[in-house]
Amino acid sequence: MPAISDDPFSVSVMLGVEACCGKAPLSPPPDIIMTSIASLSTATRLLAHQPSTHNTAPAVLAPVAAPRPASLEPVNMQAQAAAVVAQLETRAASGSGASIVLQKAGAAYELTGTKTVAVGTGVTSATQTVDLRAGAAYAVTGAFGLSSTRGNMKLELLDPKGKVVQSVLGGVGKTSAKLALTAAASGTYTLRLTGQPIDKTATTAIYQSYSLSVAQAASRIPKSGDANIDALVFGGTNSWLHDAGVLASVSKTPVKAGVTALNGALTQTVKYAFATADSLKSLSGADARGAAVMTDVQKIAVADGFAYLSNVINLRFEAVSDPAQADIVFGQNNQSGVSAGYANAPNQSGGHAEYLFLASDQSTNSSFTNGSYGLTTLLHEIGHTLGLKHPGNYNAGGGGAPGPFLPTATDNRRFSLMSYHAAPGTNANPQTLMSYDVLALQFLYGANTDPASPAALAKHQTTTFTDSWSGLETLWAPKGAELDASQTTRKNIFDFREGAFSSMAMTGGSAISAGSAASNNVGLAYGSKITRATGGRAADAFYTAATGDVTTDGGAGTDTLYLAGKASEWSKSGDVYTRKVAGKEVAHVAARNIETIAYYDSAKAALIHA
């Protein structure tokens, strides 16, 4: 379906459906067709379902009948009003919903709460409480139901200390008033609605009911402070999975030097399901073209993908059988050769779950082994469901992604599998998230620094290499990884710096070739480390990080160890080199079967080797 521009957040973004990834030989890109929330006429009919536990409808409280005052004489109006309001509030307090309770709503507002109460003749004021959060933006609407136009009304908001912080006066005959604020402090605020009759001698009922509602604006993703992250997330929108009502604030948990994860990421488990024959009946338009349930092979690949992701980021994923109870629903359909798959971004799917469709008319979606385009497509699309966008201004279904973008030099799959462009010099498909993807997702959700399932990581991450290795990956190894290239006869370059790339089983002999299909093919994610590296039979090179401990073994061949820093900072005892900076030991490097020692500036040296 064509891309439709949308602007629900007052920024130029295109959000919603997506058909994803970059081009591969003989394969269309998996690409994000970003579709308007308001225009999801097809998408909103995809899989109609009851909201999940963190996607509940706004609370609407039933009207409370009010006792009528004994007299309608104007002289008694204020006393009567006070008595009626007191009775109303007493009755409300004795039941549920004495305060306005905010619950998750749609994409435009994260939380809404409404209270509507019937009142007796002569009632001129009403109050209600609501809990607000410091720093959050709110829209408040108050209204009296009028039986005539002979009245005015005032809406006030009082802070937890009872001070009026916002006030707005409606016009004569107006039925509502609105105000907006950003809460200065967390706590219980009071909404006060006051009716003001124009003719105090009137005996007819002017006010019949009142309604107070509060909506908390969506929590938008702030800038991370890192251009590579900002090129991959939907900054300025709420397109990330998070608990209702939270604020996207910066935490103290680092994911990279100078970058910390957001507070407020989803604390509940993300539920996913596979579309069923019955659930697919609600589809229409292009979504329904050849719509089918996923194959068993595809279902296994999805489960494997989530197992891998849960060991990289702080989200948990649970398969459920009922699509109506899922946050993300998986299926396949015929995409007419336009794309290999598409998916929704978080909170941009309208009235249904996020969904991800693989193209049934693409043979690449039948295999999901490491290095396959099918696996790259699936991980790319799942990336969209978690909040990643394209790092360039392109989209297989038409239109483009919102900026900012990566520069041309890094807008490729060596750095992000969300890119449409192959890594220079190779047609290898990423078998993992790449370094910028890991960084961006950990910015949104935090890093899993204690993976519960190393086997799930190992299924995607290769650490033992032979001459046949021709893959492309980034290692997430917060507790350390051991690289073994002892069976290679080709040159290897090991780089132990976070964000850097190693070159395993290089083609082109001992020379480093920028066009080599086997260069810069193993990235190291930020927050990861290599604890041991073993070279092969050729002349290998080892580049140490500025800090940390590692064991290097050059194996056969004439091997070189590049120590980070100045020669004067290093001392040697046996086969162990120790780096001391400002009197403190910061690195220990065991060097075995190493023929040459050299030094380099690890802070200035490029993260790729060319």
Image (spheres, helix red, strand yellow):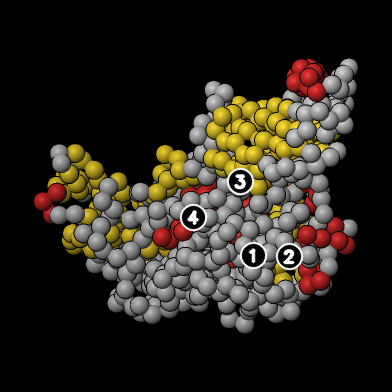
Relative image position of residue 56 (x, y in whole percent): 74, 42
Q: CA distance from mark 3 to mark 4?
A: 24 Å
Q: What amino acid is labelled 3 in the image?
A: Ala
- Near mark 4 (Cα within 10 A), the count class, few <14, some 14-19 or many ≥20, is many
The C terminus: image quadrant: bottom left
Numbered mark located on residue 39 in the image: 2
Discs 3/4, front: 3
Instruction: Please name whichever residue, 532 or 179, is drawn nearer the observer in this view of the structure.
Output: 179
Q: Earlier in the sequence, mark 1 or mark 2?
A: 1
Q: CA distance from mark 1 to mark 4?
A: 23 Å
Discs 1/4, front: 1
Q: Earlier in the sequence, mark 2 or mark 4?
A: 2
- Residue furthest bottom as drawn: 26
The residue indicated by pointer 1 is 6
What SS does tag 1 mark?
A: loop
Q: CA distance from mark 1 to mark 2?
A: 8 Å
| Residue at 26% from the left image edge and 51% from the top image edge | 546
Q: Earlier in the sequence, mark 1 or mark 4?
A: 1
Numbered mark located on residue 17 in the image: none
Say if 369 sits above or below 439 in the image: below
The residue indicated by pointer 4 is 440
Instruction: Please name whichever residue, 417 or 589, is drawn nearer the observer in this view of the structure.
Output: 417
What SS does tag 3 mark?
A: strand
Q: Earlier in the sequence, mark 3 or mark 1?
A: 1
Q: Earlier in the sequence, mark 3 or mark 4?
A: 3
Q: What amino acid is labelled 4 in the image?
A: Ala
Check contact, mark 3 vs mark 2: CB within 8 A: no
Q: What amino acid is labelled 1 in the image?
A: Asp
Relative image position of residue 229 (x, y in whole percent): 45, 58
Numbered mark located on residue 217 in the image: 3
